[in-house]
Image (cartoon, rainbow, N blue to C red):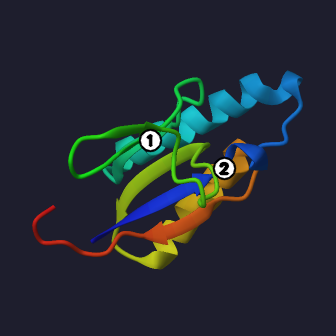
Amino acid sequence: MAKYLISFPSAAMKVPDNEMEAVGRDAHAVIREAKAAGVYVFAGGIDETVAPVLVSANGAVIEGGYPWAPPLNGGFTVLELPTREDAIAWAARIAKACRCEQELRVFGFDPES
């Protein structure tokens, strides 16, 4: 089975304030379903109130992320699934709950992880 990253950037969520409670309820329901199905690995969102830092190999710390990269923010779910089709189906469920498109990526297999 492969692990899949299902994610969206913060800017993708264009939900009226009066619908945010329903989004949270619906998204949590999908996560509970993934847990019950035994496919849940991890889910959460980046805390955008805490700035990123770059840590070099010598331990030096620089405030901010990579200056050339788009910001890393939004919500992330990692599921372990038997097929890409299953991953697409779960991504569709998350997209419906979050009211925004989800990006789907597969983690490369690493026998050490």
**How many numbered circles does the render carry?**
2
Q: Residue furthest left?
A: 112
Please name the amino acid that badge 2 sits on.
Answer: Pro
Which percent across, then down, holds residue 78?
41, 53
Q: Residue at x 55, y 67 (%)?
A: 104
Residue under pointer 2: 9
Q: x%, y% of residue 111?
A: 12, 72
Q: Where is residue 10 in the image (x, y as percent from the top left)?
A: 70, 43
Instruction: Name the image quarter holding residue 92.
Output: bottom right
Q: Which amino acid does label 1 sit on?
A: Ala
The front one of 66 and 105 is 66
Reading the image, the residue beneath label 1 is: 43
Residue 18 location, x and y as percent?
Answer: 87, 22
Q: Distance between the residues labelled 2 and 1?
A: 14 Å
**Image point (71%, 51%), residue name:** 96
Give the crowd class for mark 2: few <14, some 14-19, many >=20 residues within 10 Å: some
Q: Which of marks 2 and 1 is nearer the N terminus?
A: 2
Q: Is residue 96 left or right of residue 108?
A: right
Helix or strand or loop: what does disc 1 sit on? strand
Left or right, 57 with reference to 41: left
Q: Where does the N terminus fall, quadrant-wise?
A: bottom left
